[in-house]
Image (cartoon, rainbow, N blue to C red):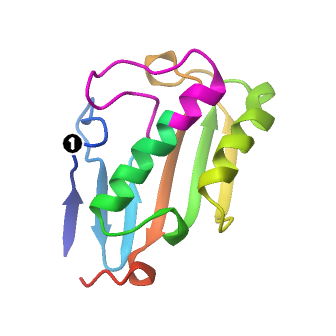
Amino acid sequence: MIQAVQTKNAPAAIGPYSQGMITGNLLFTSGQIAIDPTTGEIVGSDITEQAEQVMRNLGAILQAAGADYTDTVKTTCFLANMNDFTAFNEVYGKYFINKPARSCVAVKTLPKNVLCEVEVIADLSMAGFDV
């Protein structure tokens, strides 16, 4: 069975997708960008500010699924500029203290011209989630 995850504490989807999907004991989040869920506006003008908002959005989706950052087993990170890698890592490391597997790539353009986007795969059995 596949179950959609929806929370008002993360930005609503800006296209035909869900904030997250659960199948078995796995949560797959959609990529999160630096959108404030209450205003729908981009937060921050630099990588640190935007990465903080991205992490808050991911945290809200994880929480809605009964999980947290420590249940994450894999992330995929997209940066508009690889020169932001070190500053991005500073923020990322505060949230993903369990050091999940990760890919981090630079891309030409991200939605709404943000500086970063992150998606997560989390193991809900680690969070005690009962499917």
The answer to which of 16 and 11 lies nearer the viewer is 11
Q: Residue at x 21, y 51 (%)?
A: 6
Task: Where is residue 56? Give x, y as percent.
Answer: 45, 43
What residue span does the magenta drawing correspond to? 31-52
The answer to which image quadrant residue 17 occupies is top left
**Is residue 116 left or right of 33 when viewed as pictured?**
right
Q: Residue furthest front?
A: 94
Q: Amino acid at mark 1?
A: Lys
Front-lying residue, 53 or 82: 53
Residue 41 part of the magenta-drawn span: yes
Q: What is the magenta segment's predominant secondary structure? A: loop
Which residue corresponds to mark 1? 8
Q: Residue 75: give x, y in percent of width and height.
A: 57, 56
Percent coordinates x, y for residue 60 in the rendering:
35, 51
Residue at the spot x=42%, y=52% of the render? 59
Q: Which of 126 and 114 lies nearest the eye of the viewer?
A: 126
Q: Is residue 129 magenta?
A: no
Looking at the rendered image, the quarter that the N terminus falls into is bottom left
- Image vertical order of residue 99 relative to residue 116, above or below: below
Quarter of image, res 125: bottom left
Residue 62 placement, left or right of 100:
left
